[in-house]
Image (tube, rainbow, N blue to C red):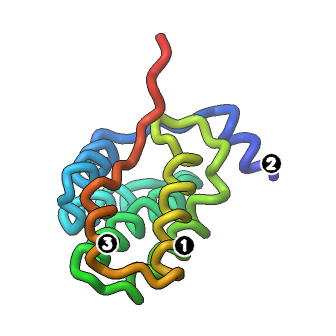
């Protein structure tokens, strides 16, 4: 818990590369987002590497859903949740709590057997939220 508390206290700024990756996800460019985020992940030496891994997995999950690969998407959703959960309280421009809720909701719909067609619509409206910045 010491690590988590330390991270929470210090906050975590996202690199321009990570912000670019998030922007690509939000524009439906999931494969490109995955490439950019993986590059950022490779350069990251701090604990939030695992959070970045979760974000990469979100982009791959969306890519799978777009291609109607529900099994792949379900697996990636679970992995991303496992990687994002420890960072729920982290102070960062990324709204991690909301992302966790959104991925969990998508995951539940896959598990419930929703059609790929219906899920595809959700993919098109999926957004990674950023916290509103306060002056």
Residue pictured at 33% horizontal, 62% vertical: 122
Q: In this orientation, which residue lies closer to the viewer: 3 or 123?
A: 123
Tell which circle, 1 or 2, labels the residue nearer the N-terminal end: 2
Distance, label 2 to label 3, CA atoms, is 42 Å
- Whether residue 75 is visible, yes or no, is no
| Element class at badge 1 | helix
| Element class at badge 2 | helix
Tell which circle, 2 or 3, labels the residue nearer the N-terminal end: 2
Residue behind mark 1: 108
Res. 59 image quadrant = bottom left
Q: Are marks 2 and 3 in contact (CB under 8 Å)?
A: no
Tell which circle, 3 or 1, labels the residue nearer the N-terminal end: 1
Distance, label 1 to label 2, CA atoms, is 32 Å
Q: Residues within 10 Å of mark 1 (few under 14, many from 20)?
A: some
Measured as percent of width and height from the top left, residue 85 is found at 63, 59
Distance, label 3 to label 1, CA atoms, is 13 Å
Horizontal side of 102 relative to 23 (left or right) equals right
Q: In the displayed structure, would residue 81 be above or below residue 127?
A: below
Q: Are marks 3 and 1 in contact (CB under 8 Å)?
A: no
Residue pictured at 46% horizontal, 81% vertical: 74
Q: In the displayed structure, would residue 56 be above or below residue 128?
A: below
Q: Are marks 1 and 2 in contact (CB under 8 Å)?
A: no
- In the orientation shown, which residue stands out farthest toward the top? 135
- Whether residue 51 is visible, yes or no, is yes
Residue behind mark 3: 118
The circle on residue 2 is 2
Number of labelled discs? 3
Measured as percent of width and height from the top left, residue 32 is found at 18, 63
Residue pictured at 57% horizontal, 66% vertical: 81
| Element class at badge 3 | helix
Res. 64 image quadrant = bottom left
Q: In the displayed structure, would residue 19 be above or below residue 77?
A: above
């Amino acid at each position: 818990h010491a690590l988590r508390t330390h991270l929470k206290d210090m906050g975590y700024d996202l690199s321009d590369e990570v912000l670019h990756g998030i922007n690509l996800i939000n524009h439906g460019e999931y494969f490109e987002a995955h490439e950019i985020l993986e590059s950022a992940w490779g350069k990251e030496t701090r604990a939030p590497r695992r959070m970045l891994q979760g974000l990469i997995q979100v982009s791959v999950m969306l890519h799978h859903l777009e291609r109607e690969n529900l099994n792949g998407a379900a697996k990636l959703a679970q992995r991303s949740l496992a990687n994002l959960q420890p960072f729920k309280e982290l102070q960062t421009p990324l709204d991690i709590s909301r992302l966790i809720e959104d991925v969990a909701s998508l995951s539940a719909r896959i598990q419930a057997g929703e059609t790929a067609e219906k899920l595809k619509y959700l993919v098109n409206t999926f957004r990674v939220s950023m916290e509103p910045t306060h002056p």
